[in-house]
Amino acid sequence: MANREHLALLKKGALSWIEWRKHNQHLVPELSAANLRGFNLRGANLRGVNLKRADLSKTKLISAILSNANLSNANLQEAELIYANLMGAELVDADLRGANLQRVDLSNANLIGADLRRVNLRKADLGNANLIGANLRSADLREANLAGAKLIRTNLSEADLVAATLCQTNLSSANLHEAELIGAYLYQAQLYQANLSEAHLSQAYLFGANLREADCYQTDLRGTNLNKANFQGANLSQANLMGANLERVDFGDANLQGATMPNGTVYYYNKF
């Protein structure tokens, strides 16, 4: 439970809290299960604070410092976290539905199982973050950095990943059905058994990507750079590969039935 003294100090406002923390740097504030719904904590220093199971829904945390804070199981629905620093924070099973995380720093953060549906993560830094099993359905990740992140079994269906960086990102078994990945950078990304059906990847960069056994049914791959990509056992039926770079691509045992090839012809055999 939250320390009553710490909670009372925080409720006085961000300025009082910042001053108190400046003079008590040796203390680790205890705010677990605290009710901070709707509070204005803009710019507050909450580095390393225990906010596990806290109610921070609709709270203003713009430019707040939450690096290495414990926010596991916290309620952050519709919270404003624009430009907040959450580097290395624990957000396991946190509820962030509808939150505004634009340009937030979540690098190296732990978001296993977090609910991030409809979240605004535009231009956010999620480099090396752990998002295994997280729900990012319909999230806005346009121009976000997800390089090296773990997105295994993550739900990214209908998410906006236009121009996002997913270099060496692990998306094995991830659900990317109808996701927007136009112009995304997926250099050496792991997409083993990923669901990319009806996703839009035109002009994306997938050099050396692993798409073994991926479902690419009706996937838009027009003008995509697939140099050295691995599609062994993948389903590419009715995919659009018009103008794509297929140099040194491995299509072993892939299903290309009805796929539109780079030159505009339609493929009518089961194997490449």
Image (cartoon, rainbow, N blue to C red):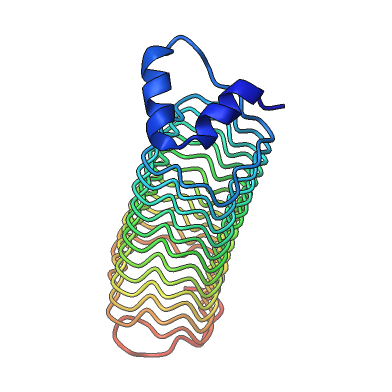
Which residue is drawn at the image coordinates 52% and 27% (left, top)? 9
Q: Please report the residue visible at 31 percent of the width from the left and 66 percent of the height from the top.
A: 204
- Which residue shows up at 37% across the image and 82% down it? 261
| Picture coordinates of residue 116, whole percent (x, y) | 57, 56
Q: Let me know if residue 45 appears in the view.
A: no
Q: Nearer the viewer, residue 192 or 158?
A: 158
In which image quadrant can residue 209 be found? bottom left
| Coordinates of residue 145 in the picture (x, y in percent) | 34, 50
132 sits left or right of 22 in the view: right
* Looking at the image, residue 133 lies above or below residue 87: below
- Eyeballing the image, is 252 above or below 238? above
**Side of 269 where 55 appears, left or right:** right
Give 55 or 120, whichever is nearer the viewer.
Answer: 55
Q: Quadrant of the N terminus?
A: top right
Q: Furthest residue to the bottom?
A: 265
> In the rendering, at what x and y percent does residue 62 appear?
38, 48
Left or right: residue 190 versus residue 208 is right
Question: Furthest residue to the right?
Answer: 1
List x then y, in percent, for residue 186. Answer: 36, 56
User: In this view of the protein, which residue sits in the foreground, 236 or 154?
Assistant: 154
Tally of numbered tags: 0
Q: Is residue 206 above or below residue 236?
A: above
Residue closest to the eye, 116 or 272: 116
Instruction: Name above or below for residue 57 compared with residue 13.
Output: below
Residue 145 visible to the viewer: yes
- Which residue appears at 41% of the width and 85% of the height? 260
Q: Residue furthest top?
A: 26
